[in-house]
Image (cartoon, rainbow, N blue to C red):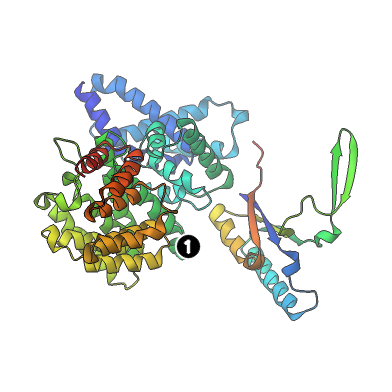
Amino acid sequence: MRYMLLIYTDETSEPTDGTSDEATMMEGYGRFAQEATEAGVMKGGERLQPISAATTVRVREGRTMVTDGPFAETKEQLGGFFFLDCTDLDEALAYAAKIPGAQIGSIEVRPVWEGD
Amino acid sequence: MSPERLALDAVFREAHGRILASLIGGLRDFDLAEDSLQEAFATAIETWPRDGVPRSPASWLITTARRKALDRLRRQQVGTRKLAEAALLAALEREEFSPPMESVITDERLRLIFTCCHPALPPEARAALTLRTLGGLTTGEIARAFLVPEATLAQRLVRAKQKIRDAGIPYAVPADGDLPERLGPVLTVVYLVFNEGYSATSADTLVRRELCSEAIRLGRLLVQLMPDEPEARGLLALMLLHDSRRDTRVDPITGQLVLLEDQDRSRWVHQQIDEGIEVLETALRRHRPGPYQLQAAIAAVHAEAATPAETDWRQIAALYERLAGLVQSPVVELNWAVAVAMVDGPERGLTLVAPLAERLDAYQPYHATRADFLRRLGRPTEAAEAYERAIEMTSNGAELGFLKARLGGL
């Protein structure tokens, strides 16, 4: 089954770019990606720009409304994702626990809607 | 009732959980398993009186239900079959030519209980699903046990089964590394099943008794699977010790609840007490005490006292104090207060329960305990008030009778 692992963290508590803390975090992500790739479950994954770069689009009654910022103000923001192909939820949860973001934020594990 | 019908009822009660677990394990689909089993039962009602009861009724039901499942899948339009269903159909068709040995039913209950108690399911759904699939209780019985409307409970079961399917919750015993974490919710549910049987919220005592046996059976399975987990042993010991008193808890003539101190100890099942204590001692040797081991130790102290007067309340109070340090629970504090009161008197007990007033205001035993302390202290007006509060919250007939008798005796 395919799962989307959505990484939610509080951007303000993330290490600043260029610091050694940031380097450590990125190393962690590198190790995770390598492990998932070697296990053959990795289908993709990206780190996202912070919400300051986000733009939200809604179409209501035929009118397109574009607003600055994320769709909702929340304590933790979507900061990246991995797309994995796992045997079952337990395997997906085990990978989720290994994502460095799980240490400071939350990983939402969502199965992909498989066509009927 | 015909002997065939009686045989069928007996299989239903004894083996429903085992049969359904085996079907779900093979079919990987709760609804398909339940529907097919229901059809198999319907067929049994028709054919057993005609052809006689099969040699192994449980195997017969499993084989028949699997055939029904196969028929159901075949009836579905080829185009509308999901990928998983097509794969299942192919597997069942292969099996048609080499059916499994009649006498061999692998026990799938353990795998299934880990599925039913998966942390990805809401806690209130875990117990309901376990009771439905492994306990074989009807939706109505479970709804009554949890005091929720039947429609609410049915909805809960539907959602849980949907999540199992859509999120890919596995039918498997977790990997070794995950076991300690995943064991907690399973133990909670097994104990809940036991308590549901033990505290008899329904008049149907036969079904209730079987809930206790089912919980103990599951407890044994858990110990077998995880011999290094002292808490699994602790839970088994706790259930064995409580269950050893089953025949003495309710007065057979009046139907009233009999207090521990008034129970006929010669009628406690001593063989079960010995087993419980042995299981507990094996657990304690690991030196990793937990809530179930401590509760079992408390039950063991009670069981070891030949008369109520010989009860080592000091040790019980000490065990409750340790338990209160492990689990933050006002209920445990209430029990600690009861034990302390047995050593130091009701005055001290009353002081200890005072800070629990707000948190336990809706908890019947809190009011029953306070009423007892006040009665023993010779404060009848306040005692009567507390008994009345307790009576308002009691639905169990035996307990109601007991409280009313105490209120009348003031």
Residue B399 appears in the picture as rendered:
yes
Residue B104 appears in the picture as rendered:
no
Circle 1 SS class: helix
The residue under the point 47% across, 38% down is B30
Q: Give the chain of mark 1.
A: B
Residue B220 sits in quarter = bottom left
Q: Residue furthest left?
A: B266
| Residue B37 point in image, percent of width and height | 39, 31
The residue under the point 59% across, 32% down is B81
The one nearer the camera, A56 or B202, is B202
Q: Is residue B176 left or right of residue B376?
A: right
| Residue B233 point in image, percent of width and height | 30, 61
Q: Residues within 10 Å of mark 1 (few under 14, many from 20)?
A: few
The residue under the point 22% across, 24% down is B4
| Residue B295 point in image, percent of width and height | 30, 61
| Residue B108 point in image, percent of width and height | 38, 47
- The residue under label 1 is B178
The residue under the point 31% across, 72% down is B286
Against B339, residue B391 (above or below) is above
Q: Is residue B252 left or right of residue B355?
A: left
Against B400, residue B244 (above or below) is below
